[in-house]
Each structure stands twice: as structure tokens, then as C-alpha cells.
Image: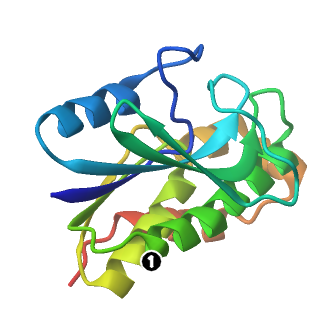
Amino acid sequence: MRLIYIHQYFVTNEGTSATRSYDVSRYLVEMGHEVTMITGVHDQSSLPRMPWYRLFQTHHIDGIRVVACNAYYSNSLNVIWRTWSWLKFAMLATWAAIRVKKPDLIFATSTPPTVGIPGRIAAGLKGIHYIFEVRDLWPEDLLRRRAHESAGFNTSAGKCWSRSATRRRP
């Protein structure tokens, strides 16, 4: 089976964050599946940063084809820059997912919830199944912390987007 796995914060054992998506991908490869991981670049991953003009970089790590989108993320970014990183990743990951030849399934895992956007769009265009794993309480957490008020976010748009990502396909 050919899988597209979308996780903005993919980290290998060389990184300094959780390696769950790496471990799952490695296991899927060991089981005979082809895995294309679409990810961003962040300060805790082992993937190198790219120059601003380069949109994608492809790596082959332990049998996993890793397509890194040039959407840099760091926990030290403020709310505006984090949001920009999430939206930029969603746009680039959509393009990357559409370019994968003949996938059988798309699996997107949050955080952030914007990983649901490329998964839903690419699955719809390719006519394949899509699984969205919700691993974070959003936008409830953001609303509880009231972080959206300082940044001027429209919370109804965030809720609509969150519902859309998790809605069942007809």
C-alpha cells in the first residue's frame, strides 16, 4: 500500500522531540508499505533548514520518503508567526500531497490542526480515503488560553475549519 503521512513536526532519533510518526512510518515500511512523509522543518528536527527560495527538499530516511516543506516552525515563535507557519505548511503540503503518484491512503496527524487541510484536499482530488488523527484539543485550548484575542483571530472561522477537517467524507 502507498501511504501519504502528513505531520508538520516529523522528528527522527537525531532530533530532540517525540518520534512517534517516525516510528510508525518505519514500522509501516518494515511491513512492506511505501510511506511518503510530508513534513515541515522545525528547530527540534534533524532536517536541515532551506534557503527561502526553495519550497521542498526530499530525503530518504530508513526507507521513508520524506518531503520537507519550507515552512519553518519553532516553539519560540509568537502567535502571528506560528499561524503563518501553519498556513504556509498547509499550502505547501497540499501541493506536495497532490504530486505524490497513486497513493492508496492519506493519514494526517495533528498538531497543528492545519495538517487536516492538505489531507482533505488531496484525498478529495485523488478520490482516496483520508484519516485525520486528532492529537490535540484545538481550538478549545486556544480559546481557553484566550490567545486568539491578542492576535485578533476570528474564533468562529477556527471552529469551522476544525469541524471541516474532521467531517466524514460522503
| On screen, residue 143 above or below 47 | below
Q: Seen in the image, is 106 located left or right of residue 150?
A: left
Q: Say which quarter of the image contains residue 64.
A: top left
Residue under the point 69% across and 61% down: 87
Residue under the point 25% across and 78% down: 169
- Please state, as top left, top right, bottom left or bottom right, where the N terminus lies in the image: bottom left
Residue 70 location, x and y as percent? Answer: 73, 52
Residue 150 location, x and y as percent? Answer: 88, 47
Residue 33 location, x and y as percent? Answer: 17, 48
**Label 1 is placed on what type of residue?**
Ile
Q: Seen in the image, is 66 located left or right of residue 104?
A: right
Q: Which residue is mark 1?
A: 121
Q: Seen in the image, is 4 located left or right of residue 81?
A: left
Q: Taking the image as drawn, is residue 5 in sight?
A: yes
Q: Say which quarter of the image contains residue 42.
A: top right
Residue under the point 25% across and 51% down: 34
Residue 90 location, x and y as percent? Answer: 61, 63
Secondary-structure class at tag 1: helix
Q: Seen in the image, is 3 located left or right of residue 140?
A: left
Of residue 59 and residue 163, the one placed in the foreground of this image is: 59
Q: Taking the image as drawn, is residue 164 in sight?
A: no
Mark 1 nearby-residue class (10 Å; few <14, some 14–19, many ≥20):
some
